[in-house]
Image (spheres, helix red, strand yellow):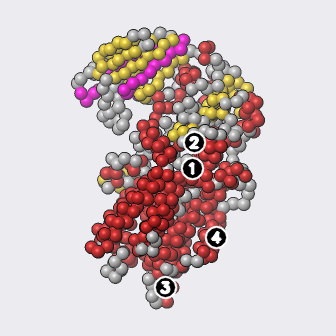
């Protein structure tokens, strides 16, 4: 294919992307998307260049969730995207980089989908439609609203293109291995989830095509598999530093980051559009509102025209040998996208589906089933392009292309749903104001907390002038939930022990200031005022100075402890500061009748005692103490990965 044609097609797709999603304005101060997810991606695009130029380990950020920090390989931090847009970020800012990537994502996906379809069909117009159906699929337009790393899905068609070229002998082994390794590396740097699901998708399709291949072709499939493995090893070696921290962070990742049941594709979503779709979106809005997940993740919609074309392919199976494994592959991925149980109009039928088996597989179990809709859209787009290309008679070609254009219209995005917003900047968070008020390198709490507000944007605006014990860069670290105050800060439900909980949290995390920004919930503002800590108003932000630790009375529990139901796991540490406690240790239901042995270490002595079902032991903890409780056995009945031993109740004296 000529370079000029490829460039022209990309410009065409980019124009469509701008018409559907774009806006003319100051890209330094506006952004596309919804909720607070875009704030995290803006922060990510700043983080990698900033960390590298400041000599900071970019893989572990201590600027969020201080002092433990956060492993940036276990979130959608997009190092490849951040490094690719580094010049833009440097010349302007990370918001411009975010906006550019957001508009490029559908165009790039459509373009690489076009390249794949053009190679398979040798028909430019058929490939144009195939590329559009993939790049502007329901999956893609949903992710544009806030999941930048998932909308940048252009590498997947390239991976398939290189594999098919190698299978046909149109590319040499060295070139294939090199280009595949580089593409895998790019995909790793954009989304580890898409890379993992790409391997899963590739393995499923490879097995299906191998199963239906002629005996003479099976050797080529096995040779291709070996070369793919070689390219994977090379990519892993090149990405060794990144993968080192991936492995290192395994122990800090929740057993299940998001519920696969809650993020499974709804069967009816294949036929019914969401409000993000121009045609029919408003008409079927009430039905779509019942689908699982949220509007960003309800991307299974194909539409009746595409489904009709797919059904038509059944009659062509005898004459086109590649159709049967291709359609079986499509059906398999559709079934995987439906998750572990079948959902219809938001109702869980509790009918088990094959994805339930994947819940026991390492790493891949973290993938959300509904995101397999991307692969469904890609395979469907390829099938449509092949269907258009094989029409021989002029009349048949005209009819097919007219019907395919109808399919394109049916999935067209609704531009009104893709809004641009002013970045919620605050004068207080300008670097000079931060250093003047807080000083240098202070650790703070920012309200609204975590995903409830623009705390990540404010930290970015400050030029990383402070660290924060919180943030929104992905799932909350499991260790953080042992702090009861997180429930109050996140949900704005102030508990009676708020003064104790916030004091202990600030002391343990070296928090110097609490910054109450615009949009903070009134219950939290009132609770902060009730503390009577020194507070000043500066550029619309209330700056609460945390008192010297010596003047505070508090206690807290860390380690394997869940304050919501008071269960302790293997080990918990209780710290008191000027606040004596009465500690009650209770033996609750255990699968085994055998009591659990508790080891209590207070620094000066170690004692041991047994706690059986229904047993209660009361211990007085002095006002300035640190004791560690360790259980010799745990169990996890009914609590998934939570391994528990006894319950702890702490009452201030």
Q: Which residue is mark 3?
A: 397
For marks 4 and 2 on the same chain, the one whose residue lies earlier in the sequence: 4
For marks 3 and 2 on the same chain, the one whose residue lies earlier in the sequence: 2
Q: Secondary structure at mark 4?
A: helix
For marks 3 and 1 on the same chain, the one whose residue lies earlier in the sequence: 1
Q: Are marks 2 and 1 in contact (CB under 8 Å)?
A: yes
Q: Are marks 3 and 2 in contact (CB under 8 Å)?
A: no
Depth order, front residue of 153/299: 153
Is 109 located above or below residue 589 in the figure? below
Q: Position of residue 30 (x, y in %)?
A: 69, 52
Q: Position of residue 297 (x, y in %)?
A: 49, 54
For marks 4 and 3 on the same chain, the one whose residue lies earlier in the sequence: 4
Q: Main secondary structure of the magenta part?
A: strand
* Magenta stretch: includes residue 507: no
Image quadrant holding the N terminus, namely: bottom right
Where are the magenta residues, as a range?
565-592
Is 525 located above or below residue 231 in the figure? above
Q: Which residue is mark 2?
A: 58
Residue count near mark 1 (Cα–Cα under 10 Å), binned few <14, some 14–19, many ≥20: many
Answer with the quarter of the image where residue 322 lies: bottom left
């Amino acid at each position: 294919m000529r370079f000029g044609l490829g460039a022209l097609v990309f410009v065409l797709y980019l124009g469509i992307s701008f018409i559907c999603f774009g806006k003319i304005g100051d890209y330094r101060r506006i952004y596309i998307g919804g909720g607070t997810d875009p704030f995290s991606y803006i922060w990510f695009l700043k983080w990698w260049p900033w960390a590298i130029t400041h000599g900071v380990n970019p893989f572990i950020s201590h600027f969020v969730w201080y002092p433990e920090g956060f492993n940036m390989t276990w979130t959608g931090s997009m190092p490849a995207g951040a490094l690719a847009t580094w010049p833009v970020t440097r010349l302007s800012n990370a918001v411009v980089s975010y906006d550019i990537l957001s508009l490029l994502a559908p165009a790039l996906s459509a373009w690489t989908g076009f390249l794949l379809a053009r190679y398979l069909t040798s028909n430019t117009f058929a490939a144009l439609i195939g590329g559009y159906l993939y790049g502007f699929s329901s999956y893609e337009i949903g992710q544009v609203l806030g999941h930048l790393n998932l909308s940048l899905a252009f590498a997947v068609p390239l991976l398939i293109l290189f594999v098919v070229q190698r299978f046909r002998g149109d590319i040499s082994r060295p070139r294939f291995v090199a280009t595949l390794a580089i593409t895998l590396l790019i995909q790793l740097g954009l989304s580890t989830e898409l890379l993992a699901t790409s391997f899963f998708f590739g393995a499923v399709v490879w097995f299906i095509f191998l199963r239906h291949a002629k005996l003479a072709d099976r050797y080529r499939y096995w040779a291709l598999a070996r070369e793919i493995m070689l390219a994977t090893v090379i990519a892993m070696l090149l990405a060794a530093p990144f993968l080192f921290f991936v492995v290192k962070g395994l122990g800090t990742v929740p057993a299940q980051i998001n519920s696969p049941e809650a993020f499974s594709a709804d069967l009816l979503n294949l036929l019914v559009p969401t409000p993000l779709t121009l045609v029919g979106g408003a008409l079927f809005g009430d039905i779509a509102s019942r689908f699982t997940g949220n509007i960003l993740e309800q991307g299974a919609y194909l539409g009746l025209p595409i489904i009709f074309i797919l059904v038509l392919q059944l009659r062509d199976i005898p004459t086109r040998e590649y159709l049967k494994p291709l359609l079986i592959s499509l059906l398999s991925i559709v079934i995987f996208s439906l998750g572990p149980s079948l959902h219809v109009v938001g109702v869980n039928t509790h009918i088990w589906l094959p994805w339930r088996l994947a819940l026991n597989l390492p790493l891949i179990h973290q993938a959300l089933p509904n995101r397999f809709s991307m692969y469904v859209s890609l395979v469907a787009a390829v099938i449509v392009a092949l269907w258009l290309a094989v029409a021989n008679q002029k009349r048949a070609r005209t009819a097919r292309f007219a019907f395919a254009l109808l399919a394109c219209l049916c999935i067209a995005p609704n531009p009104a749903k893709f809004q641009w917003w002013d970045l919620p900047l605050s004068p207080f968070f300008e670097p000079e104001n931060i250093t003047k008020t807080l000083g240098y390198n202070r650790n703070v709490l920012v309200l609204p907390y975590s995903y409830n507000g623009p705390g990540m944007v404010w930290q970015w605006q400050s030029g990383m002038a402070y660290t924060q014990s919180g943030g929104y860069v992905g799932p909350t670290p499991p260790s953080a939930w042992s702090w009861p105050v997180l429930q109050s800060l996140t949900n704005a439900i102030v508990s009676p022990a708020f003064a104790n909980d916030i004091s202990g949290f600030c002391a343990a995390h070296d928090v110097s200031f609490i910054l109450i920004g615009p949009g903070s919930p009134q219950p939290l503002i009132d609770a902060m005022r009730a503390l009577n800590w020194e507070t000043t108003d500066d550029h619309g932000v209330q700056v609460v100075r945390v008192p010297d630790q010596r003047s505070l009375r508090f206690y807290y529990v860390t380690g394997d402890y869940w304050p919501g139901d008071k269960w302790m796991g293997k080990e918990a540490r209780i710290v008191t500061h000027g606040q004596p406690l009465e500690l009650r240790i209770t033996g609750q239901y255990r699968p085994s009748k055998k009591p659990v042995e508790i080891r209590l270490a207070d620094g000066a002595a170690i004692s041991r005692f047994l706690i059986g079902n229904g047993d209660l032991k009361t211990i007085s903890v002095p006002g300035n103490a640190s004791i560690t409780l360790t259980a010799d056995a745990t169990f996890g009945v009914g609590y998934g990965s939570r391994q528990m031993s006894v319950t702890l109740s702490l009452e201030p004296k």
